[in-house]
Amino acid sequence: MYLTTFGIVLVFFIVGALFVAVGLFTAALVRPKNPTPEKLRTYESGEIPMGSPWIQFNNRFYIIGLAYIIFDVELVLLFPWSVVYKTLGWYSFIAMVIFLMILIIGLVYDWAKGYLEWDKPNPVIPQLNELIIHRKKVNKEN
Amino acid sequence: MNIHLIAFIVLGILAIASAIGTIATKHPIYSAMSLIVHFFALSALYLTLQSPFVAVLQILVYAGAIMVLVVFVIMLLNLNEDEKQTIRIQSRNSFGIVLAAIFFIMIVTFIMSNPLNQPNSTNVYNLFTAQSLGSVLFTKDLVAFEIVGILLLSAIVGAIVMAKKKLIN
Amino acid sequence: MNEILWISLEALIKAIIILSLLLLSAAISVYLERKLSAWIQLRIGPNRVGPFGLLQPIVDVVKLIMKEDIVPNGANKFLHGLAPVISLAVAIMVWAVIPVADPIKIGDHIIQMGISPNADIGILFILAMTSVGVYGIALAGWSSNNKYSLLGGLRSSAQMISYELSMGLAILSIILISGSFSLSDIVNQQFSHWGGFRWNIFIQPLGFLIFLTTAFAETNRAPFDLPEAEQELVSGYNTEYSGMRFGMFFLAEYANMATSSAIITLLYLGGWTLPFAPSAIGLEQGTWILGLVQFVIFAIKIYLLVMFFIWVRWTVPRFRYDQLMRLGWKVLLPLALLNLILTSFGVLFINH
């Protein structure tokens, strides 16, 4: 039974893959190919690219990923609950609320400690008189 | 030949090949990609065991959440070639072999005990539907379920606190 | 053996039909976007190719096929080629579980309207596919050897996973009401009460708003189009793509818009059902005419939502990234949790 259902899905997948392959193949047949060094250079607003793009990033993205995994697991644990909920009654409501509350404590803790803040860089904005002093210095040197 | 057997053989070969690919490829992103393929093969194997719910959870949690974090870390770290050399671990091979041997013995003993052929669990496949999982989780195993909640709580607080600490230093 | 052959043939025909409809709907969405954005900006929009510029999408595709495929220096060739395929494959695969009408009966053969609409994990499958869709964009950004692409890819993946939680919680509330993961069951449940008008939007208004917002974020559409914010990131993750591979990203984006609209329609707006019993206008359950009428209703609802997507894009300014994260984690997630608890309370209160 399941094999039939997912066999149908498999047929769909194969047809979709064929469609993608045919699209790429016809494009490969008709498109021109005359690369030049300028064309192959990566785009950096018209400048010549400097350095490698594969630099190390701020790990704030990593924190988002971590938090996502944990709440995703929570979500997954609640799926079996959601389908039997109507038959189990108040008892499972209380069980679920306790479970959610435990996790909401985690959310509230991170929130209160400021861990959910998106880190912003702290640029030093030059003050007006600093600019004037700088300008004077430059003028003197000239 | 039985269609289940063909599916099992094809998917099993795919799973083993991608698992080997995970540890054999040099580049971390290719390792991550083969691990994702492996999870998809496992998920399809669950389908042949008539447990679509488990199969979808496999993709949702492993391919959709955990591997996303792994790919994230690879993208964020962007180790260049000489840094990769310094962190290569060679001395732990023997440790890994011991671990693998223990795991292998565990699996063999589990299969030898023949748990799926017990007379009182003839409907073993029905255990893995969402309904049966839900009714077990919220009646018999309720305490374990709430403890999992506490475990997740400590995980979320601990992981984020540690990650943030590194950021400040 | 003969039976397997017939099932495969039916599956093949359905696959081709659904795929063509998906492509057609992507083409219509592109045309609608260009035409509506033109009207919003007091322009005329495409009007040269065919009547009212209707053939514009076809010409676009031909142009994309004829364009050179440029893989920049230093890019990872394999992953650069693979990324758009993943994006498009995910956009297509979601339709494996989406039903478009009630099953119809020809002779004594019941034909399901959809690839596999009775799969009892329908909505979970969609959620799983959405979470896998991150890879297309993340890999495109990573493999391009371009700073804009990498930033766009990172931004986009972080955005998609942040909003997926709220989306999952909103879906969970719907499952609580229906008690089933199957999309056909969810639609039929909305039809079977209140004379066919118990749409989930009326009993889940908060959930609907949450789902709508997350759908915008998941499709990377304005006001959540930070991954491709032109003013700062050129074109984000697809900066280094050209020709057919760019076309695949483009196609995936518009297919995703139609898919999201379809899911919103199924979950909250009553799907393909008529707001009254079909026999009231002389249509019998299971006839192909009823199937056709239901499909047309479904398509109309989808396109109204697609137009809503386009309208929002050309009206609302873009978020800043920290605002986006604040909205996701500090507004939508708590609201979705609240919605879940309120819904579970309400469901139990009515049932007991």
Image: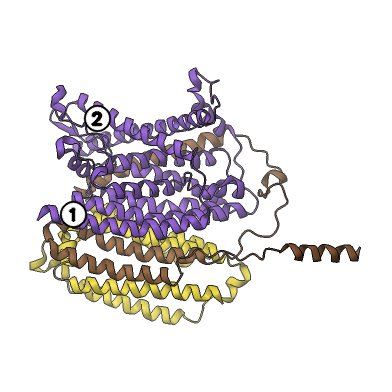
Chain in brown, by letter, is A
Q: Residue furthest right?
A: A142
Q: Residue furthest left?
A: B119
Q: Are marks 1 and 2 on the same chain?
A: yes
Looking at the rendered structure, the kind of residue marked 2 is: Gln
The label nearer to you, 1 versus 2, is 1
Chain in yellow, by letter, is B
Disc 1 target residue = C346
- State the residue at coordinates (51%, 65%): A60
Looking at the rendered structure, the kind of residue marked 1 is: Gly
- State the residue at coordinates (30%, 50%): C206
Residue B83 % position (x, y):
60, 72
SS type, badge 2: helix
Q: Is residue C244 left or right of residue A17?
A: right
CA–CA distance in space, label 1 to label 2: 31 Å
How crowded is the residue under tag 2: few (<14 C-alpha within 10 Å), some, or many (20+)? Answer: many
**Image quadrant containing the C terminus of chain B:** bottom right
Disc 2 target residue = C294
Residue in the foreground of this view, choosing between C351 and C61: C351
Residue in the foreground of this view, choosing between C245 and A107: A107
- State the residue at coordinates (79%, 63%): A132
Q: Which of the two discs, 1 and 2, labels the residue nearer the N terminus?
A: 2
How crowded is the residue under tag 1: few (<14 C-alpha within 10 Å), some, or many (20+)? Answer: few
The colour one sees for chain C in the rendered image is: purple
Residue B42 in view (yes/no): no
Q: Is residue B67 left or right of residue C12?
A: right
Q: Is residue B51 left or right of residue C246?
A: left
- State the residue at coordinates (18%, 35%): C196
Residue B161 % position (x, y):
45, 75
